[in-house]
Amino acid sequence: MPNGIPTNGNMFRRVISMAELTIRTTVWQEFKAVAQKQRKRPEALAEQVLKDYVQQIADDELLRRSMSEARKAPFRSGDAVQVVRDYRRKRARKS
């Protein structure tokens, strides 16, 4: 894999070498056991876990911002539901 470019024909996936990471033996053994139960390579599972963690952080931030904006809204969520229902009823009557 010269220059981080895979030679297996998959030119759309860029692989970057990770800095060396030290994990306690007991933790790695437990992780390997989990990977084996899921029939995955430990390295592939570790990559997926890291991706999931990054996504979870992004989702948490989005939720936090959404909740903050919702607190600033002039009406409560229950009121918003009622506004939408009323709008739909009025629209249905016009049809």
Image (cartoon, rainbow, N blue to C red):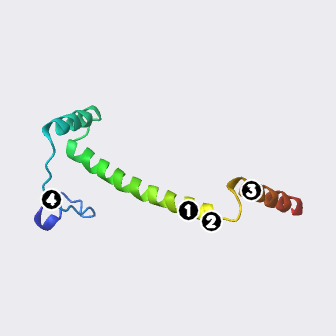
Q: Which disc is residue 79 wearing?
A: 3
How packed mark 1 is, by other alpha carbons closer than 10 Å (few <14, some 14-19, many 20 or more), is few
Of pointers 4 and 1, the one earlier in the residue sequence: 4
Name the residue carrying label 4. 19
The tag earlier along the polypeptide, 3 or 2, is 2
Tag 1: amino acid: Ser
Q: Describe the element under mark 3 as helix, strand or loop.
A: helix
Find out whether the residues at labels 1 and 2 contact each other: C-beta distance under 8 Å: yes
Please indicate whether residue 5 sits to the left or right of residue 38 in the image.
left
Above/below status of 53 relative to 70:
above
* Res. 6 mark: none
Tell me the distance, in whole angstroms, between the alpha carbons under discs 3 and 2: 14 Å
4 and 3 marks in contact (CB < 8 Å):
no
For the residue marked with disc 4, what is the amino acid?
A: Ala
Query: Which residue is drawn at the image coordinates 11% and 65% (left, top)?
Result: 2
Q: In the picture, which quadrant includes the N terminus?
A: bottom left
Q: Position of residue 47 (x, y in %)?
A: 26, 50
> Dot 4: what SS?
loop
Task: Using the numbered discs, state the Cα–Cα distance from disc 3 to disc 1 in whole angstroms.
Answer: 17 Å
Which residue sits at x=81%, y=58%? 86
Q: Which mark is residue 68?
A: 1
Taking depth in this image into account, of 85 and 9 the one nearest to the observer is: 85
Q: Nearer the viewer, mark 4 or mark 3?
A: 3
Give the distance between the C-alpha atoms of the residues marked 4 and 3, in whole angstroms: 51 Å
Q: Amino acid at mark 2?
A: Lys
Q: Is residue 93 left or right of residue 44?
A: right
Where does the image place residue 85, in percent across and percent down from the top left? Answer: 78, 55
Work out whether mark 3 precedes mark 1 in sequence or the reverse, and give the earlier one. 1
- Residue tagged by mark 2? 72
Q: CA distance from mark 4 to mark 1?
A: 37 Å
